[in-house]
Each structure stands twice: as structure tokens, then as C-alpha cells.
Amino acid sequence: MKRIYFFLKAYYVDIAVALIGVFGVFAAWKYGQTTNIQQIVSLTVLVVTLLVIIYLRSREKDFIFSALTWRRDREKWIGYGTFQLSRVCSAYEIINADPGYIHSDVLTWSDYSLSFDFKIGNKCLGVIVRAVNLANYVMLQITPSGIRPHIRVNGGWKKWEAKELGLDVGLSLDKWYKAIISCDKGEVFIGITCYDGTRFDRVWNIPVGNLVFNFKKEDKDTGVDIPFPINLEYGSIGFRNWGDEKAFVKNVLVEKL
């Protein structure tokens, strides 16, 4: 009985619309001039349409799209800080948002492609992928000079500089770009299309094993090294900027690979 109850609760709108259609069909039968075959066909079409609608709604989508050009586009994003519509740029501004914002619909996704339009207003844009939660994720910090990968594990950070990984890119402030970031197992493919039509393509591998963090009770202590395993095989996408780091994003599309 509970299964039936929650099924009706999930699809009551579709069922109500179908019932209205059925009453319309019966009204046509009673007051119109329709043959038996026409009556059966119309009722069959109505039932089949209802079943198709319920099936399509119950399936997990292979993509999600968030335009980030209206205020209500924020409904599916969870996090802390400033992530709001800029009416001047017709995009969402992210600033002073730590640990950032992630999309609630793709928390269990693993291999996917993320694309979006962005403009750096000040310093950088932090792009989050494979976010298990707001304390564990991969962040690609896009700066004018390059892309700096970060890993956040239990709130602690490990980062790499762009030059040491060959992820240096020449970008300009206040120019719009299109980024495509694909996560395939342990590889992250990073593509950025510039305003002049040129494109940068880079690949970065998510490290495996443990990250060691040093914890101290006081500043003068040597501290204790504690390893934390990297477990980022799946997780959501999002954005993060700290302090006065500012950027604008819109047209966010996530597709399963």
C-alpha cells in the first residue's frame, strides 16, 4: 500500500490531468457523434500518453542544465557565501563563497562533462568537480595565468601550481570564455575557448593514495602528521571563490559520459 501511496503522491498532477482528459473523452462519447472505434482509440491514446509521461519523469536524466540567468535558477544549488544574479552581466556572481556551491542533482554522478560560460572579475574562478560534499572535492582554480588544481579532503587543502603541471593559460580579466571540463575516471580534461577563437586543452590526473596534513595544538608544536585517503570517484559540480576573488558564470551544462 505504501508503494501505491507514494506513487500516487509523486505523479498526482499527471494522473489528475489524465483523469480530466478521460472525462473529456466520456463527454465526447455522450454528447458527440463518435463511433466505438474512435472512442477506443481516443481512450487508448490517452492512457498510453500518461504512461509515457510517467516513464520519462521517473527516469534519471542524462544531463542537467542551469542557465543562471534568473533568480529561481539558484534553487538546486547548495552552499554558503554570495552566489547570486548579477543583472548587469545577466549571469551569477560568485564571491566570498567558501566552501562554495554545488548542484544537488548530480551528487552521485561519476564520469561527466561540465561546460559553462565564465568571466573572471577579480583574481580567479574556482570550479568544483567530484564533490562528495562541501568538505571533499576537486577544485580547478582558473586564473589569468593558468589553472591551479586543488584537492579538499575533510576541509584541508592540497594545491599545485599551474607552471609545474604545464597548465599555464593566458586569459584576460573581464572577458567571457567557454570552458569544458570532463571527468573520466581519474583523468580531468580541461578545455577553454578564448574570445578570439583559440582553444587551450590540458589534462590533469587526480592523484591517488593519501594526503598528509599536519595538525598542531599550538604554533610552537611540531604537530602530528595524519594521512587522509583521497576518495573522489564521484560527486557533484560547482563553484567556489574565497574572499575578494570574483567571477561570473552562466549556461551550466552537465552531461554523463
Image: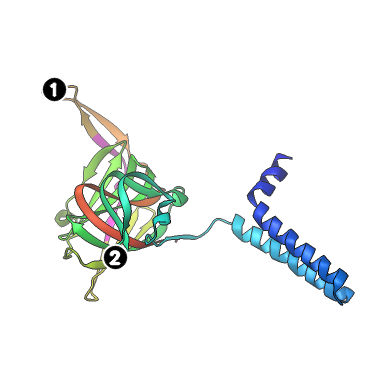
Reading the image, the residue beneath label 2 is 191
Report the front residue among 10 and 224: 10
Q: Nearer the viewer, residue 161 or 52?
A: 52
The quadrant of the picture occupied by the C terminus is bottom left
Residue type, mark 2 in image: Gly
> Which quarter of the picture shows residue 187?
bottom left
Residue 233 rendering spot, x and y as whole percentages: 40, 47
Measured from the top left, where is residue 255 in percent x and y?
44, 61
Q: Quadrant of residue 37?
A: bottom right
Q: Please, what is the three-letter code of the amino acid marked with disc 1?
A: Asp
Span of residues in magenta:
203-212
Give yes or no for residue 208 being in the magenta stretch. yes
Under circle 2, the secondary element is strand
The CA distance from mark 2 to mark 1 is 44 Å
Kindly state the secondary structure of the residue where label 1 is placed. Answer: loop
Q: Which of the 4 quarters of the picture holds residue 155?
A: top left
Residue 47 showing in the rendered view: no
Count residues near mark 1 (Cα–Cα under 10 Å), then give few for <14, some for 14-19, many for 20+.
Answer: few
